[in-house]
Image: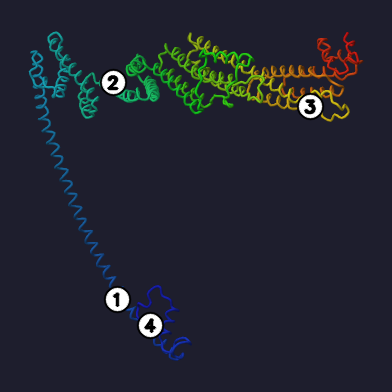
Amino acid sequence: MATTAHLFEEPFDADEYIERLAWRTPGGGSKGGAEAFDPKRLLEEFQNHIEELKQLDEKIQRKVEKLEHQCHREAKEFAHKVQDLQRSNQVAFQHFQELDEHISYVATKVCHLGDQLEGVNTPRQRAVEAQRLMTYFNEFLDGDLRSDVFNNPDKIKEAADIIQKLHLIAQELPFDRFADVKAKIASKYHDLERQLIQEFTAAQRRGEIGRMREVAAVLLHFKGYAHCVDVYIKQCQEAHVKEKLDETRHSDVEQYLKNLYDLYTRTTGLATKLTEFNLGSDKHTFLSKLIKSIFSSYLESYIDMEREYLRTRGAMILQRYYDSKNHQKRPVGAGSIQDLKERIRQRTNLPLGPSIDTHGETFLSPELVVNLLQETRHAFERCHRLSDPSDLPKNAFSIFLLLVDHLCVEHIDYALEIGLSAIPSPDAKNANLYFLDVVQQANSIFHLFDKQFNDQLMPLISSSPKLAECLHKKKEVIEQMEVKLDTGIDRTLNCMVGQMKHILATEQKKTDFRPEDENNVMIQYTTACSKVCAYVSRQVEHVRKSMDGKNVDTVLTELGIRFHRLIHEHLQQYSYSSMGGMLAICDVAEYRRCAKDFRVPLVLQLFDTLHALCNLLVVAPDNLKQVCSGEQLTNLDRNLLHAFVQLRVDYRSARLGRHFS
């Protein structure tokens, strides 16, 4: 194998190199090779190869020395070249300094020459300008403006420059000799100023920014330049307001009202910030007039559009709700015979036909109410901001009337009418007494209505005569609803009592209080009592969920009194054996336990008294007088006591009447 330098290039592996050398040597392979292993031959080959490696090493070493020598020689040559370049650069830098000094010298000479030329040219230009102005001044002196600059509209910029200078010169002239010419110059000055402002306004309307900039530059030297700024601000505001409002005024009233409120609020806020600056003694009046000039045409028609929007929006919200219920609103108070029957049936217990079935739907929607109150809240906010202070109470009252119409009349009052119509007659069986749900929702809604009245309407009318009208209207609405609520609750209580009466009539047997086997009675209270108490407990809980405040006690008191009257009258329909009397006492004890759920002392007292009366059914005849003189019965009418004693089976046989003689 020839020994060359490329065999030792990276990555070099000595083991692999030796293995390759041994494999190429005849007789130097492994045992499985084609020839037998010959260690002498392999040793000889290694010795020869080592000699070759030594020769290669010497050869490479000589080459390295040669390259090192060459590198040293080239480094010296490069160093000499760098030194020559440095010397050349130094010479060039010296030449550059000389050139810079020469340029500075020439520039100084040029500037000096320019100053000399300017010194000669400036007086000449001034003389020419003075001669030109004197020519124009003579025209004003003669009263005949012949120059094209004063008669050509396209040269208004040049004319403005001339008249502005003539106006300054005229200020220095004596009044007695030059009064006429001074007046003519002043007249032309104001005329050109007016034309320039008109041209600026027209350019702004056309959106020509370049022309506006050009005219403003000319006006800058005139006294009326401030008017240019005022015109610009006013035009910007009017253009922005007109663009924002006119595009929605007839197409989208809601967005128009929102834009008007937003723009007016931001403008008045800006005016408030501007008052912090020194704008003169009448800055408030000036800013108010400016705002009024921009918004007056919109504010004059504001409240009419607000009312029309609320009227339309409220009707749409109501109709959308009833459509979602697939309900066609019934006319209320139409004066028909059917309406007359309905009103009579609502206020009496006369069966004038079946009640309508609403399937438990109250026709009161919290979502609808929130939407109406939200729209009204925004209307009050806009009214407060956009109304003239003298018209604010009147405008707020008109918005309040729309809220009353939509929320109280068209929604709550209508739901109460429907709820009253849906209350079944007292003798109905398994009736759905959902009117209490109507009461609950109506109360919740009215609380929201009352909160908005106090929070948002009162601050707008509290110091005006409209306050009395608002309070009167609110009182009128409350009284109308209370009449219907009271009527509905009263009829609902009648239905509850009717349902109790039906349970007693169905479940109570005459044999309950006169059992055939006096010695084999195992029940604690009758089935009728159990079902009535369960029904009453449900209704008490229903009342508690549906009412709030003192109304709970008021309604439960009335229900408890009617409950007591029913049980009192019911017990007087039967005659009682000794064991039957005990069962009656057990029933009344259960009724009394049920009465505790009312949490009304009067109701519990009534059942305590009834329980004491039932003791008259079981006490021994000789003890009747003592029992009647007890604490709970002593103040009762003797006829009432006697009536209970007469219910005993043994009344005649035991001749109990003599105990009441």
**Label 2 neighbour load within 10 Å: few <14, some 14-19, many 20+:** few
The image quadrant of residue 398 is top left
Q: Secondary structure at mark 3?
A: loop
Which is closer to the viewer, label 1 or label 3? 3
- Tell me which numbered mark, 1 or 2, is placed earlier along the sequence: 1
Image spot of residue 449 (x, y percent)? 53, 19
Q: Secondary structure at mark 4?
A: helix
Which is closer to the viewer, label 3 or label 4? 3
Which is closer to the viewer, label 1 or label 2? 2
As measured in the structure, the alpha-carbon distance from the residue carrying label 2 to the one carrying label 4 is 103 Å
Residue 53 - label? 4
As measured in the structure, the alpha-carbon distance from the residue carrying label 2 to the one carrying label 3 is 95 Å
The image quadrant of residue 157 is top left
Q: Is residue 651 left or right of residue 481?
A: right
Q: Tag 4: residue type?
A: Leu
Residue appearing at x 30%, y 21% in the figure? 234
Q: Secondary structure at mark 2?
A: helix
Q: Tag 1: residue type?
A: Lys
Q: Is residue 131 left or right of residue 272?
A: left
Q: Which residue is mark 3?
A: 526
Which is closer to the viewer, label 2 or label 3? 3
Pointers 1 and 2 in contact (CB under 8 A)? Answer: no
Looking at the picture, tell me which residue is in the foreground, 339 or 376.
Answer: 339
Q: Which residue is mark 1?
A: 66
